[in-house]
Image (cartoon, rainbow, N blue to C red):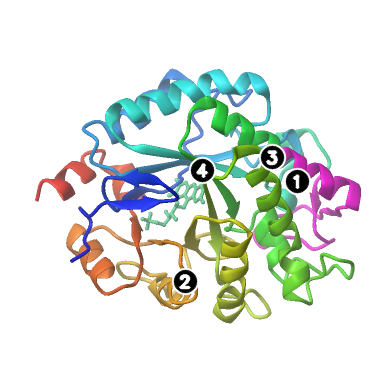
């Protein structure tokens, strides 16, 4: 019977248990986005002993204009590879697999942080943001695709086991997928599934081309906006097989256009109403994160077929020994 201690093989990579530390921004990078000793110590503390199967490191910006916040890690320059390779070497030494989450903030970026103009799919303010973005031209979209691919090449060069493309929590790819923020009428139109996913499929293709077939490519999908006119579960049930066919190896499900906390959604595994149905549409593993604080609840969610992997975020953030206690029960 599958539980938190069961291993799993994803695209040829064996992960020794089903516990994942999901991406959590720490704001511990320096002003240029370089890995610091403080950041290394934070990951060391949480991964020591090898109790976590997979660590997805915090969202890292792929280009200066895609930076979301101060202290965020950069994967936007070749000279980032050295610090990132120290980070992944430490996680590997402790016994966990490691994936880096790549992100572009899109219309959620702040000029006072980036020093750049702000671009999104359309001239629509992203919920909980204050800046009116400019609509991306085809030229800028092409550059975003290249930036994701270049970043992925750096992630591979640094020695990670894989890369995760961020399409949740209101950032750029979530903005393209959501009809609330995507009002385009061109090939990326917000009024068809094809248009809403066009950028995703282009990014996946470009990333896969540079990392090769044997590297893990995950996507964090904001599978429901929980807002009128936004992404619905039905949309994600249609999108999931398309993402799988494009080359995604792992679907890491989250939700919320303005953040992962959804008013009224509580309990252990509060996105299980999304992951269970999505899992039935694909042949790749699906990861569930959200509200899980009890290892027994994680076992139950796996046994009930709600997901293939379990993310435990804030509980591990607050208690670096959470994973040790969960595995030594
Ligand atoms: C401090 C903090 C930073 C976060 N940063 C990220 C991030 O960089 N990328 C991401 O996809 N989710 C991020 N999240 C969301 C978590 O990955 C996770 O989905 C969320 O905390 C819900 O899971 P939990 O209830 O186990 O904490 C962050 C959450 C927290 C608390």
Q: Residue furthest left?
A: 329
Q: Which badge, 4 or 1, is on the more N-terminal residue?
A: 1
Position of residue 224 relative to residue 63, above or below, is below
Tag of residue 145: 1
Q: In this image, 277 relative to 46: left or right? A: right
**Sequence-first disc among 2 and 4:** 4
Q: CA distance from mark 3 to mark 2?
A: 35 Å
Q: Is 308 left or right of 180, judged from the image as shown?
A: left
Q: Could you tell whether 6 is left or right of 89 in the image?
A: left
Label 1 Cα crowd, 10 Å radius (few <14 / some 14-19 / many 20+)? some
Categorize mark 2 by other alpha carbons within 10 Å: few (<14), some (14-19), many (20+): few
- For the residue pair 31 and 45, the one nearer the viewer reads as 45
Choose mark 2 or mark 4, whichever is in front.
Answer: 4
Q: Mark 2 and mark 3 in contact (Cβ < 8 Å)?
A: no
The image shows residue 2 at horizontal and vertical percentages of 22, 63
Q: Are marks 1 and 3 in contact (CB under 8 Å)?
A: yes
Residue 146 within the segment the image draws in magenta: yes
Q: CA distance from mark 2 to mark 4?
A: 39 Å
User: Is tag 3's residue or tag 4's residue first in the polypeptide sequence?
Assistant: 3
Q: Quadrant of residue 129?
A: bottom right
Say if the magenta span includes residue 72.
no
Q: Nearer the viewer, residue 261 or 19?
A: 19
Which of pointers 3 and 2 lies earlier in the amino acid sequence?
3
Span of residues in magenta: 118-147
Observer-nearest residue: 201 or 33? 201
Q: CA distance from mark 1 to mark 3?
A: 6 Å
At 46% across and 46% down in the image, what residue appears? Answer: 23
The residue located at (90%, 47%) in the rendering is 139
Is disc 1 placed on a helix, strand or loop? helix
Instruction: In the rendered structure, find residue 214 and report the number of the disc placed on it.
Output: 4
> In terms of sequence position, does the residue under pointer 2 or pointer 1 come before the other?
1
């Amino acid at each position: 019977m599958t539980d938190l201690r069961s291993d799993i093989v994803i695209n040829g990579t064996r992960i020794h248990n089903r516990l994942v530390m999901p991406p959590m921004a720490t704001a511990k990078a320096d002003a240029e986005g370089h890995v610091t000793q403080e950041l290394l110590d934070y990951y060391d503390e949480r991964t020591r002993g090898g109790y976590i199967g997979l660590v997805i490191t915090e969202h890292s910006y792929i280009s200066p204009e895609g930076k979301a916040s101060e202290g965020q890690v950069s994967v936007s320059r070749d000279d980032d590879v050295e610090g990132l390779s120290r980070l992944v070497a430490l996680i590997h030494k402790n016994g966990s697999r490691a994936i880096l989450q790549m992100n572009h903030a899109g219309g959620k970026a702040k000029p006072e942080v980036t020093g750049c103009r702000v671009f999104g799919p359309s001239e629509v303010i992203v919920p909980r943001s204050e800046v009116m973005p400019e609509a991306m031209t085809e030229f800028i979209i092409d550059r975003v695709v290249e930036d994701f691919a270049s970043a992925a090449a750096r992630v591979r060069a640094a020695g990670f086991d894989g890369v995760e493309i961020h399409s949740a929590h209101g950032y750029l790819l979530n903005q393209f997928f959501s009809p609330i923020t995507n009002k385009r009428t061109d090939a990326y139109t917000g009024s068809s599934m094809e248009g809403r996913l066009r950028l995703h499929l282009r990014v996946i293709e470009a990333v896969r081309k540079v990392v090769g077939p044997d590297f893990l490519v995950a996507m964090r999908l904001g599978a429901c906006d929980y807002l009128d006119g936004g992404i619905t579960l039905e949309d994600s049930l249609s999108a999931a097989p398309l993402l799988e066919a494009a080359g995604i190896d792992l679907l890491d499900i989250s939700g919320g256009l303005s953040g992962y906390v959804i008013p009224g959604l509580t309990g252990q595994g509060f996105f299980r109403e999304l992951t269970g149905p999505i899992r039935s549409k694909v042949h790749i593993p699906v990861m569930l994160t959200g509200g899980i604080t009890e290892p027994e609840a994680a076992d139950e969610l796996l046994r009930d077929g709600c997901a293939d992997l379990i993310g435990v975020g804030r509980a591990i953030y607050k208690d670096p020994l959470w994973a040790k206690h969960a595995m030594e029960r």
